[in-house]
Image (cartoon, rainbow, N blue to C red):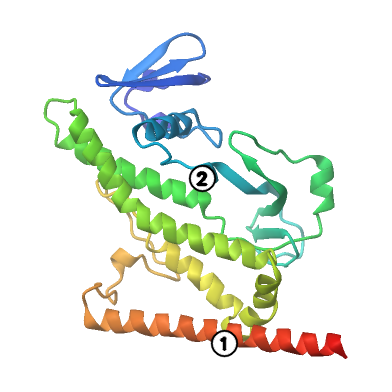
Amino acid sequence: MFDRLPEKNVVKPHHLVTEIIESEDGVRAILANGTEEQGDVIVGCDGVNSIVRQAMWANANKMMPGFITLAEKRSEATCLLGMAPTPIGLGTRDMTCVHEHGFSFLFLTQPNHVYFFVFSKLAKQLQCPESRRWTDKDAESVAEKMTPNFALGGNTGIESVAVLTNELHRLARTTPSGRPTQQAITATFQRYQQLRSARVRKIHFVSGFITRLQAFDGVLMRFTARYVVPLLIGDRRIADQLGYLVRDSPKLDFIPLVSRKGTMAWNDERRDLLSEDDPRQKKKVILQQSLVVTAACMLILTCMWWWSWWRRQASE
């Protein structure tokens, strides 16, 4: 990407942003070496302890007190990510899943490497910007406890970058003077939020549910993972759900894309995809919701029966 930039001197590596100042004339980034950069928009891709995000939180609460709550700044899980040469005997495209209480692992094999993700629940929640780092002792203690996870955080971030890039490109194209007004910038970010909100909430819910399910988070999740999913749903359905989420991902809309065929087609390339207003699509949604409700009722009845049986055994 760097080699394709028409003006490489605009990239300044090894510079730390320490403060962001917003005004009616634009926004300024104050760097650690005392210099500053000024522009119309700042897009933060600066990690978990993001200076940009902290500035956004502060500005949001200044305009609407209490808008960003403490609950949004908490973390209850940690992750260890690693890669290694693929051991002899493993496949070249396998996903290995093993459930264990309090842990959620994912192993993915490729021809030359195996990637592993270790998710574990923290003993106590952390408050941003507090963080926890893995030690060698931590890694050794969970080396034999593995469960899968959707790991959609990075993918969701990439999607957001694509949508925001589309909106900023559209803004630049419709601004002949070269510099957009504050009203135009605000409208662009409002549209970006509208486009992303529903999808991010959906991914957040599904990803969180799968994490708790596969980490045996509580008696109900443990029972569901060990008995309901294998007997009523199946692992293939869980894998398909990931495909259903991914194939609805946004794309850059101002550059030509080479279409590639896979197991699942992208939603914007599917000829069988029905619009939301199509009666057949409405019937399909109703059927899916009915199946979900039916499965939930079966789960509740099963849990009630199991709990009643356990109490009888305990009383005897």
**How far from the left and from the top, in percent, is residue 277?**
21, 74
**How far from the left and from the top, in percent, is residue 165?**
31, 41
Image quarter (top left, top right, bottom left or bottom right) of the N terminus? top left
Question: Would you place residue 308 above or below residue 203 in this image?
Answer: below
Tag 2: residue type? Glu
**How far from the left and from the top, in percent, is residue 254?**
24, 46
Q: Nearer the viewer, residue 94 or 239?
A: 239
Disc ID at residue 123:
none
Question: Would you place residue 173 above or below residue 313 in this image?
Answer: above
Question: Would you place residue 207 above or below residue 195 in this image?
Answer: below
Q: Nearer the viewer, residue 258 or 161?
A: 161
Q: Residues within 10 Å of mark 2 (few under 14, many from 20)?
A: few
Image quarter (top left, top right, bottom left or bottom right) of the C terminus? bottom right
Q: Secondary structure at mark 2?
A: helix
Residue that badge 1 annotates: 298
Tag 1: residue type? Met
Lower sequence index among marks 1 and 2? 2
Residue at 72% in and 59% down: 103
Residue that badge 2 annotates: 72
| Image label count | 2
Residue at 51% in and 45% down: 72
Q: Residue furthest left?
A: 176
Q: Residues within 10 Å of mark 1 (few under 14, many from 20)?
A: some
Residue at 66% in and 83% down: 303
Residue at 38% in and 30% down: 62
Left or right: residue 202 versus residue 256 is right
